[in-house]
Image: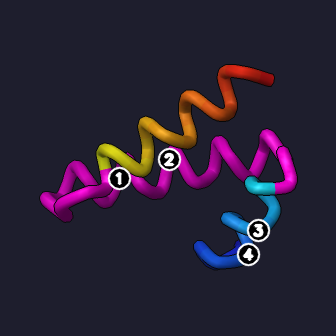
């Protein structure tokens, strides 16, 4: 499993699978109360949706 930095690099290169993995990770973190993670999940959701 890739770490966040690796996933982010791949996601920024328009790798949709990496974008979806980031969405899932940030969403899980947001559910346990980490601040700012909903925003990150939403940002990647929108980028993935444009593909």
- Residue under the image location 52 percent in, 45 percent down: 23
Q: Given this view, does label 4 or label 3 mark the residue nearer the observer?
A: 3
For residue 31, above or below residue 2: above
Residue 32 shown left or right of residue 39 in the figure: left
Residue 31 shown left or right of residue 3 in the figure: left
- Residue under the image location 68 percent in, 31 percent down: 48
Callout 3–callout 2 Cβ contact below 8 Å: no
For label 1, the SS is: helix
- From the top left corner, tell me how far across and down residue 16 is, in percent: 79, 40
First in sequence: mark 1 or mark 3?
3
Callout 4–callout 1 Cβ contact below 8 Å: no
Q: Name the disc covering residue 28, or none.
A: 1
Please give the range of residues in magenta. Answer: 13-37
- Residue under the image location 33 percent in, 45 percent down: 39
> Magenta-highlighted stretch: main secondary structure?
helix
Q: In whole angstroms, how far apart are the C-alphas of marks 2 and 4?
A: 15 Å
Q: Name the disc covering residue 24, or none.
A: 2
- From the top left corner, tell me how far across and down residue 21 is, in percent: 63, 51
- Residue under the image location 76 percent in, 56 percent down: 12
Q: Name the disc covering residue 9, or none.
A: 3
Q: In whole angstroms, how far apart are the C-alphas of marks 4 and 1?
A: 18 Å
Q: In whole angstroms, how far apart are the C-alphas of marks 3 and 2?
A: 16 Å
Residue 15 shown left or right of residue 11 in the figure: right
Callout 2–callout 1 Cβ contact below 8 Å: yes
Q: Given this view, does label 1 or label 3 mark the residue nearer the observer?
A: 3
Is 21 inside the magenta-drawn segment? yes
Q: Quadrant of the C terminus?
A: top right
Q: Residues within 10 Å of mark 1 (few under 14, many from 20)?
A: some
Callout 4–callout 3 Cβ contact below 8 Å: yes
């Amino acid at each position: 499993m890739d770490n966040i930095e690796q996933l982010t690099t791949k996601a920024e290169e328009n790798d949709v699978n990496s974008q979806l993995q980031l969405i899932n990770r940030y969403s899980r973190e947001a559910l346990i109360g980490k601040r700012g993670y909903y925003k990150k999940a939403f940002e990647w959701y929108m980028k993935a949706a444009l593909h």
